[in-house]
Image: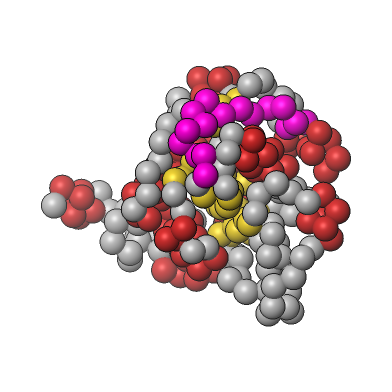
Amino acid sequence: MLGKVLDIVWPRACEVCGRPVDRAGRHICSDCLNRLPFVPATGCCRRCGRDALGLDAEFLCEDCRTYRPHFDRAASALRMEGEAREMLNAFKFRNHYWLQDDLVDFLEATVRARFDVAKVDCVLSVPSTLFHLWDRGCTPCRVLAKPLARRLGKPCPPFVLRRKNAPKRQGRLNEAERRTNVVGTFGVMRPAVVAGRTALVVDDVMTTGSTLSECAAELKRAGAARVWCVSLVRSLHT
């Protein structure tokens, strides 16, 4: 009721175009929603989720054949293009956390389309460094993971994955540097949570997949039977 009253007194403006929002409880209007660069549910790599234009069937991409990521399957909701890039930057770097419900909508739709939700035992998030946690006041990935877990009816236990050190920022590195930069970065604090189970790991951006692969490697060392990954945005490296 309070939300409805606030929407009347202070109407929501679309995060993308600035016009009044025509979707209850959301911050992206229908027109802008229809223009977002969603990753298709078909024609994607069966391992990392990279899509290929013109393909309808699953395939195994060259990167996955070469580097063999430790996660069993990954998927992304959006391509890092146009409005999707702007939304991600606003959420991650300018604390536009009112976008949470919209972004979790995208993640939920992706998970339900690409994974067998019944087999997911827990939802985890990629942890931030202590500096980023102090700077932002929270972990953006966990801001997405907790409501996603509630919608899926799964637990989202805290303090499972942890950062053991603070590597260089991945965004400033090339492909080869990204893959080596995250080695040894993560650890598992509560192995009993994942032992023998399927974990769904949530990240905000996936580029080479090296961060999620390293998280998956540590979870499997701790006994996880299977690790699936979902990211909000997929940014293809060059």
Q: How many marks?
A: 0
Residue 236 appears in the picture as rendered: yes
Q: Does the magenta stretch include residue 17?
A: no
Q: Where is residue 215 in the image (x, y as percent from the top left)?
A: 63, 38
Front residue of 47/151: it is: 47
- In the image, residue 214 sits, relative to residue 17, either above or below, namely above
Residue sitting at the far left: 1
Image coloring type: secondary structure
From which residue to which does the magenta span run? 181-196
**Residue depicted at x 49% and y 28%:** 190
Residue 86 appears in the picture as rendered: no
Front residue of 213/118: it is: 118
- In the image, residue 19 sits, relative to residue 163, either above or below, namely below
Q: Does the magenta stretch include residue 189?
A: yes
Front residue of 11/232: it is: 232
Front residue of 111/188: it is: 188
Q: Position of residue 236 (x, y in %)?
A: 74, 54
Residue 178 is drawn in which quadrant? Answer: top right
Residue 157 is drawn in which quadrant? Answer: top left
**Residue depicted at x 78% and y 56%:** 64
**Residue depicted at x 50% and y 68%:** 113
Q: Position of residue 126 (x, y in %)?
A: 56, 37
**Residue depicted at x 79% and y 39%:** 179
Left or right relative to 119: residue 50: right
Left or right relative to 78: residue 138: left
Left or right relative to 53: residue 155: left
Q: Where is residue 56 in the image (x, y as percent from the top left)?
A: 68, 79
